[in-house]
Image (cartoon, rainbow, N blue to C red):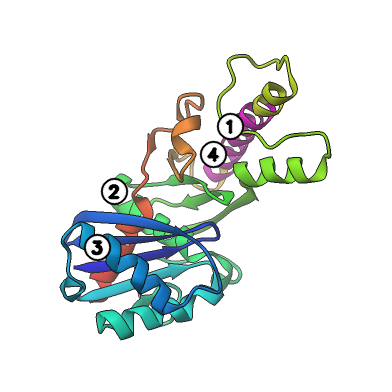
Amino acid sequence: MLLAIDAGNTNIVFALHDGNELRHKWRISSSSSRTADEYMVWLTQLMKLENISPDGISGAIIATVVPQALFPLQLLCRRYFNCTALVVGEDNVDLGIKIKLDNPKEVGADRLVNGVAAHIKYGGPMIIIDFGTATTFDVIDEDGDYCGGIISPGVNLSVEALHMAAAKLPRVAVEKPEKVIGTGTVTAIQSGIFWGYVGLVEGVVRRIKAEFAETHKGAEMKVLATGGLAPLFFDEIPDMEAVDQELTTYGLSEIYTRNS
């Protein structure tokens, strides 16, 4: 089996793939101080609950946007799974796509992995919206090449920033309010966050499509959403054609297969 690790700013996802099949997926909060031994104690307990032996893991691949997390994750794979993990972004790992940026090293590994997966599963050209720690928009052309994107503050990050910066404003749960016009502080914040991000996504998608069409002979773009909060917004944004929560782990599996 393949151990695919997606290390983000908020969570680290560990996924087990058996061929093309996703067998299991677990997540743990990101921490730059966590050691390889701590990861192993936590992971082996979860694997034991599913009757999976560590000996069944034959390969590993890592995508991380947290540089401090890379070494302990690599050590985890070497010490406990007896394999050297492929690392997305390193020169020896072929993604099978071109990165059409001024500095290709700047783009997050998870965004490239999502681009690979989206093109394989859905074709292109494509806008991928990831509702993560940041809300990102990634543009993939008809050949699957990465053309660039947009980064904005994530939904939960905005809620937290509002709570911390304004003494009288409480921290609220992110959810769709019953009405646009809030009749209390909590519902007013929820409406501002929810409908504010609906407007942000709709506006950005519209502008991306218009700009892309100008340079690609009027090509029409699909829109795909991923990330934990994607289902919350899906019904209110008609441009979104699908939500795929397994996009990153699928992409990691495909990249590993390409490089095996």
- Residue 4 x/y as whole percent: 32, 65
Query: In the picture provided, is 144 more to the left or to the right than 49?
Result: right
Q: Residue at x 53, y 66 (%)?
A: 65
Judged by its main secondary structure, the magenta piece is helix
Q: Residue at x 33, y 57 (%)?
A: 249
- Of badges 4 and 2, the one in the foreground is 2
Mark 1: give few (<14), some (14-19) or many (20+) Cα within 10 Å: some
Residue 245, numbered label? none
Find out whether residue 110 is within the magenta segment: no
Label 1 sits on residue:
202
Mark 2: give few (<14), some (14-19) or many (20+) Cα within 10 Å: few
Label 4 sits on residue:
209
Sequence-first disc among 3 and 1:
3
- Of badges 4 and 3, the one in the foreground is 3
Q: CA distance from mark 4 to mark 1?
A: 11 Å
Query: Circle 1 sits in a helix, a strand or a loop, which is it?
Result: helix
Label 2 sits on residue:
121
- Image: magenta residue range: 192-213
- Residue 167 x/y as whole percent: 84, 39
Q: CA distance from mark 4 to mark 3?
A: 44 Å
Q: Residue at x 58, y 42 (%)?
A: 208
Q: CA distance from mark 3 to mark 1?
A: 41 Å
